Image (spheres, grey):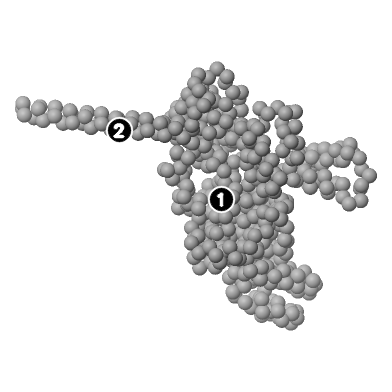
């Protein structure tokens, strides 16, 4: 059983060194995560977020209208790839019009972000298509291709789909990074939601995109994502609605309780959480572009460090299993279908050599002397089909999207809008230590009671402060009146 195998590894390495178990949505993996969290409450159950974005893309391509559009795209790409003369004129037109393009990109079924590359390449080549039709129409012998190139609705649909797929492709490439954290994933969800929110109502796919996003968002989102976003020093409470703080605080207390801390410790954690929200000392440090959340939180030395410990633990979690699947894909690629006699030692050595070269790629001849900034690297990645390596299980990908959308007549708004004000992100693209065993207090308590009492006490303090201020103003006014009467 998978859960038993995971438990053996946890015991071998030490349970205190684990913060979470991250897998996809396969039934055996889901059950294993639940059993591990039950046995080790401090090891959190998190579903791989990279699959959320992959499933959004895979659900969209199941729509009948998009299926028909993809068929036309593939026919168009195949014609220009197979016809040497047509392909030559296409390259000539791109060069003469100074259009930066590597030619037409074919949609690949297992590359969920490739539809952006396909639509983008077709739209870039549209002026060349018009030139070919007007000046060299004789080279296009296929009547169906001529109809596609003359169909303005086809290019209009192409623009609609590219607008939806651009944030999906970027998100897929980014969340499969080894350095991605929970806050990054939530930020990418926000960016995708904002992109869908800003789509014109004239876009025929907007409603379908909203329904699919809501479905996958509800499946994947864990309260821990919102908490980690809140604890990101650059974002803090940006865009979060006022009512969300209670849910964030409750999540923090529940996680802190699972780590074995007392009720008094949770109260101190809540106090620090409120000071962090208000940017009070020691949580008033600036956050620069060269900082990381872990470095920022690690620079806070004031004790007790309850919130610091929780934040560092959260930011140490990589909520994607893409890196793990990438390693197994590498092993499969090295082994191949014919190297069946290769022993494990040889395979391990080959993998280490490959990993070394990848880790030191900047020192290799191809990149020697080139200074690539981060934006250049991201641009290269987003223009390729990298990143779409995850394979989706049949049980999580096989759904009747068209029927679900037809039956869902009331879902026209993004669920994420319940906790995030999407209008605040219109320009978003610009956008642990050991447990203390000497704590005083009880371990048998209800986190919701802690939150309610904390917020109630805070409300009373605010009311008392307002009452004192009113009394002070009243006394000052009386003194002025007495002074005026005496004069």
In x, y percent, where is residue 117? 67, 60
The residue lying toward the viewer, choosing from 322 and 38, is 38
Above/below status of 203 relative to 244: below
Above/below status of 272 relative to 83: above
Who's the residue at 62% across and 72% down the image?
154
Residue identified by numbered label 1: 218
Q: Earlier in the sequence, mark 1 or mark 2?
A: 1
In x, y percent, where is residue 468? 25, 29
* Contact (Cβ within 8 Å) of mark 1 with mark 2: no
Who's the residue at 92% across and 47% down the image?
340
Residue 385 quadrant: bottom right
User: How far is mark 1 from mark 2, CA to CA?
Assistant: 37 Å
Residue 266 is left or right of residue 59, and the answer is left
Residue 57 is left or right of residue 337, and the answer is left
Residue 298 visible, this orientation: no
Which label was assigned to residue 463? 2
In x, y percent, where is residue 342? 92, 43
Above/below status of 151 relative to 384: below
Which label was assigned to residue 57? none
């Amino acid at each position: 059983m998978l859960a038993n195998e995971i438990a053996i590894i946890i015991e071998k390495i030490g349970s205190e060194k684990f913060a979470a178990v991250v897998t996809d949505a396969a039934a055996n993996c889901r059950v294993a995560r639940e059993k591990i969290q039950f046995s080790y409450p401090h090891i959190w159950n998190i579903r791989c977020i990279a699959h959320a974005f992959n499933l959004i893309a895979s659900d969209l391509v199941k729509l009948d209208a998009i299926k028909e559009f993809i068929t036309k795209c593939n026919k168009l790409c195949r014609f220009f790839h197979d016809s040497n003369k047509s392909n030559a004129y296409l390259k000539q037109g791109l060069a003469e019009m100074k259009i930066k393009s590597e030619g037409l990109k074919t949609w690949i079924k297992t590359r969920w972000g490739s539809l952006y590359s396909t639509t983008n390449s077709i739209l870039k080549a549209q002026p060349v298509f018009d030139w070919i039709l007007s000046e060299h129409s004789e080279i296009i012998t296929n009547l169906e291709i001529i109809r596609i190139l003359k169909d303005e609705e086809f290019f209009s649909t192409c623009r609609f789909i590219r607008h939806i797929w651009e944030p999906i492709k970027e998100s897929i490439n980014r969340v499969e990074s080894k350095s991605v954290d929970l806050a990054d994933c939530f930020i990418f969800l926000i960016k995708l939601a904002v992109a869908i929110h800003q789509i014109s109502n004239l876009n025929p796919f907007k409603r379908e995109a909203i329904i699919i996003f809501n479905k996958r968002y509800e499946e994947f989102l864990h309260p821990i994502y919102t908490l980690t976003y809140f604890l990101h020093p650059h974002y803090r409470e940006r865009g979060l609605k006022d009512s969300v703080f209670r849910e964030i605080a409750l999540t923090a207390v529940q996680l802190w309780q699972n780590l074995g801390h007392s009720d008094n410790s949770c109260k101190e954690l809540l106090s620090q959480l409120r000071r962090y929200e208000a940017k009070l000392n020691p949580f008033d440090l600036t956050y620069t572009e060269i900082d990381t959340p872990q470095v920022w939180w690690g620079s806070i030395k004031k004790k007790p460090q309850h919130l610091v410990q929780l934040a560092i633990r959260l930011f140490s979690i990589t909520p994607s299993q893409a890196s793990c699947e990438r390693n197994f894909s590498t092993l499969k690629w090295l082994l191949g279908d014919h190297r069946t006699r290769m022993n494990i030692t040889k395979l391990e050595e080959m993998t280490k050599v490959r990993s070394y070269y990848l880790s030191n790629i900047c020192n290799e001849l191809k990149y020697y002397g080139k200074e690539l900034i981060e934006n250049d690297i991201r641009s290269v990645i987003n223009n390729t089909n990298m990143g779409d390596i995850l394979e989706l299980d049949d049980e999580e990908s096989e759904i009747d999207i068209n029927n679900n959308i037809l039956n869902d007549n009331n879902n026209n708004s993004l669920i994420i809008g319940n906790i995030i004000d999407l209008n605040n992100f219109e320009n978003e693209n610009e956008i642990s230590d050991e447990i203390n065993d000497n704590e005083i207090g009880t371990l048998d308590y209800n986190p919701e009671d802690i939150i309610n009492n904390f917020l109630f006490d805070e409300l009373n303090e605010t009311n008392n402060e307002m009452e004192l201020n009113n009394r002070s103003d009243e006394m000052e006014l009386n003194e002025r009146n007495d002074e005026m009467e005496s004069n």
